[in-house]
């Protein structure tokens, strides 16, 4: 059963806004068994909206539309969809009072733009939006469903979770398609595909594998199609068991796991704590660790030592080591990791020191040179990495490498 | 002149990957005067790729295609486009040796998958990719151009900047469309639209304004169309002068400015330095500050004090203050800001302490309660914010609020 997503807004086409809504909706639709056939982004232009909706609605059973419902005059989605379904706009008292209430909380008065938001087509099911002023609208025709929602991500997600997903699950009869993700770190897509070529060839015909690379992390997705979800998941799990034998060194988790959530689980389970001493990552390792809810149970804190003075005063790095080996060196990374572990009395200490760029590189230590160290009661280890020329990429790559080193160290220490 | 973007890959449709390429290409195309008509995301399916390409290529003068050029068997874009243009695949020796070289650097041998990447259609202009193994391909027919590029963002950007943009600038005659952005912080879209309704009504007919909200920051885009770029920019600048009189309290910058780049400029210009003491933001304020190249000139470092013990030991927060007022309080925020400023001997100290969630809230201090303080030689000020229920949103909103408070404080101290 096909679904499509249409996102409306000039800001998407001129690139001012990255379309994160489509990825989120794509995941949700896939999870409940829809085949997402196409994602289309178009501008706030009436003729184009009508054409895109008509094409999608005629080839796919479900069409989700976001955007163009704001209070400003460039937002014309509601009027256009009403026209497509031959509907009249009428005032909805519940929405009107919801908008009034939301504005009151913010200390604002109702204005003409807000009043216009309380108008809805008379041929739709109105989906209340308790997080914003524009409601969602659901239209049904000849067994097909079209839903229009605001483009603000957290309003759209709220309407999807509370109204749209329950409704369409009930409305459509779906074929079972399930998948699981295997999260890997430490190699390249082409290399992984080569190692797994035999595994891939031996997959049963109703199973398939896909490689989904992001910067540093490659996700493997195994998808299964058939009648019974439970059987399909068991089939996938059998394949995951095989993968655990072929590439154990690269697999760090499954499904929603991230390196930071996995080390969180490891530390909670073993009742250990961690702190970070960051130079080139500038707090990004700490930010990743603390993005996990409940991280205060195992994360104590950090010293971000951008200035060498802070490395010396706070982390007890030898001034001489900096003078002879430089701030980006094995000895300084090790002293930083050990310094933070002792200072904050944690079980593990992570340290990063490198040249993020674009400036500061030399022939001997080009931009992208990074030393990462982990200190624990069992000793201190450090690894040198050579990343590329791009500052943000170097910060991200260094942070992932640091988290993965900690993950391996915790396993080794067990 | 219309342009379209087609992104190919199952990972986009099932939502495993957010399509950031389209936004980047959309910005580039807009900057050189193209009207981006549509962005279409489709799966690695031959019939669908042929149909999407044919539709886009017939209605738009320029079509940029990314993705589906990887070494694995699910990647079929090259073969499909070759078929569309009736081209044969032939071995390209330059690409072959480039791939060989890239693999050698990584210590890898050429395999069958890599060899397949050195095949190119005989009817295209090959665009060298020095950052990866898949080259770009440019096709021309009846005054229309189609370009196929890899989906890896930093490879695609490299090919766009070095080959595609110079080529299409030269190939097409463009009408002049220019725009500038005005960055605002501190209000809502509907409120801003209300304040600016008169301004909007008075705009000359060849100028338009759009509201581009992101979480916390609203960008205003003023676009101008006409013959002469220089005249158009002068017209836009006249309107920006007007905006500076109407909403000075919200405007913090223009075009590529971010709050972190603006405070970077302020600090560099005034030769001042900053450090941060972060609890609920967990390093995110430092990460934002250090994402700016050259930030080591004014950013000294941070103490991330997740544990109250670190607040007391490192930042000299009164244990009594934590006991009586709690860690999320005005007095603790102020002591943290002052503590870090004195400890690291910087001109400014930023502190954040709050309840990011999802746990830890109470009736008196619900999730989203955040105190932010700024310390400088002129004194310490603190503000209480009430954000929402979402952890990541609270971290982001708190970080933006902290940076904006610093920005205002630096202006006030001048």
Image: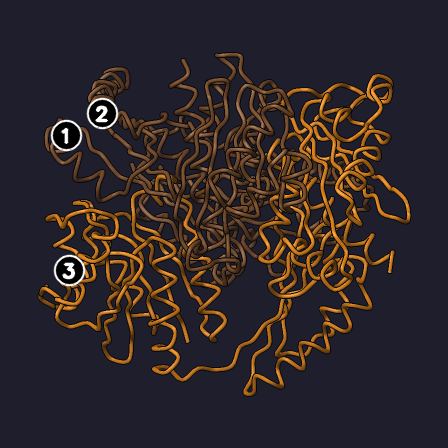
Chain colours: A orange, B brown
Disc 3 crowd rating (10 Å Cα; few below 14, some 14-19, many 20+) is: many
> To which chain does the residue with label 3 belong?
A
Both marks 2 and 1 on one chain? yes
Give the position of the N terminus of chain A as an image quadrant: bottom left
Measure how far apart labels 2 and 1 are at the Cα level: 8 Å
Left or right: A144, with A254 as reference point: left
Q: Are marks 1 and 3 in contact (CB under 8 Å)?
A: no
| Secondary structure beneath label 1 | helix
Viewer-side residue, A299 vs B124: A299
User: Which numbered disc, 2 or 1, marks the residue that appears first in the sequence?
Assistant: 1
C-alpha gap between disc 1 and disc 3:
25 Å
Q: Is residue B144 visible?
A: no
Image quadrant assignment for residue A281: top right
At 74% from the left and 74% from the top, the residue drawn is: A202
Q: Residue B365 versus residue A321: which sits nearer the camera?
A: B365
Give residue B243's mark.
Answer: 2
Numbered badge on residue B331 = none
Picture disc at residue B199: 1
Q: Position of residue B363 (x, y in %)?
A: 42, 60
| Residue B45 seen in this snapshot | yes
Identify the secondary structure beneath mark 3: loop
Q: What is the C-alpha distance between the residues marked 2 and 3?
A: 30 Å
The subunit letter for the residue under badge 2 reads B
**10 Å crowding of disc 1: few (<14), some (14-19), many (20+):** some
Nearest the camera: B2 or B272? B272
Asked if disc 2 and disc 1 are in contact, CB closer than 8 Å, the reply is yes
- Location of mark 3 (residue): A118
Is residue A239 rendered to the left or right of residue A181?
right
Q: For the image shown, how many numbered marks are present on the structure?
A: 3
For residue B29, what is the image quadrant? top left
**Quadrant assignment, res A59:** bottom left
């Amino acid at each position: 059963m096909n679904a499509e997503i249409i996102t409306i807004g000039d800001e998407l086409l001129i690139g001012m806004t990255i379309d994160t809504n489509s990825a989120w909706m794509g995941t949700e639709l896939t999870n409940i068994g829809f085949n997402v056939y196409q994602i289309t982004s178009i501008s706030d232009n009436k003729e184009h909206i009508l054409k895109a909706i008509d094409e999608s609605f005629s080839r796919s059973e479900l069409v989700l539309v976001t955007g163009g419902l704001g209070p400003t005059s460039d937002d014309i989605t509601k009027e256009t969809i009403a026209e497509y379904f031959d509907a009249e706009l009428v005032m909805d008292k519940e929405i009107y009072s919801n908008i009034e209430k939301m504005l009151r909380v913010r200390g604002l008065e109702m204005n003409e733009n807000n009043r216009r938001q309380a108008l809805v087509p008379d041929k739709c099911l109105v989906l209340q939006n308790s997080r914003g002023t524009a409601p969602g609208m659901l239209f049904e025709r000849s067994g097909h469903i079209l839903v229009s929602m605001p483009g603000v991500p957290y309003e759209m997600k709220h309407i999807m979770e509370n109204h749209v997903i329950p409704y369409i699950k009930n409305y459509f009869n779906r074929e079972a398609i399930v998948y699981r993700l295997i999260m890997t770190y430490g190699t390249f897509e082409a290399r992984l595909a080569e190692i797994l070529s035999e595994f891939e060839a031996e997959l049963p015909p109703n199973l398939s594998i896909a490689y989904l690379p992001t910067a540093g992390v490659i996700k493997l997705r195994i998808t299964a199609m058939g009648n019974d979800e439970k059987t399909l998941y068991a089939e996938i799990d059998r394949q995951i068991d095989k993968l655990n034998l072929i590439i154990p060194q690269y697999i760090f988790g499954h499904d929603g796991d991230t390196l930071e959530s996995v080390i969180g689980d490891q530390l909670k389970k073993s009742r250990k704590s961690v702190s970070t001493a960051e130079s080139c990552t500038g707090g990004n390792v700490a930010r990743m660790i603390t993005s996990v809810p409940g991280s205060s149970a195992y994360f104590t804190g950090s010293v971000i030592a951008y200035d060498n003075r802070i490395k010396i005063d706070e982390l007890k790095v030898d001034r001489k080591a900096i003078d002879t080996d430089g701030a980006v060196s094995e000895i300084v990374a090790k002293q930083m990791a050990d310094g933070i572990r002792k200072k904050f009395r944690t079980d593990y200490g992570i340290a990063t020191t490198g040249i993020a760029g674009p400036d500061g590189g030399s022939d001997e230590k080009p931009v992208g040179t990074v030393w990462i160290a982990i200190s624990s009661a069992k000793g201190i280890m450090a690894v040198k990495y050579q990343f590329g020329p791009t500052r943000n990429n170097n910060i991200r790559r260094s942070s992932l490498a640091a988290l993965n080193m900690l993950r391996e160290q915790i396993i080794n220490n067990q």
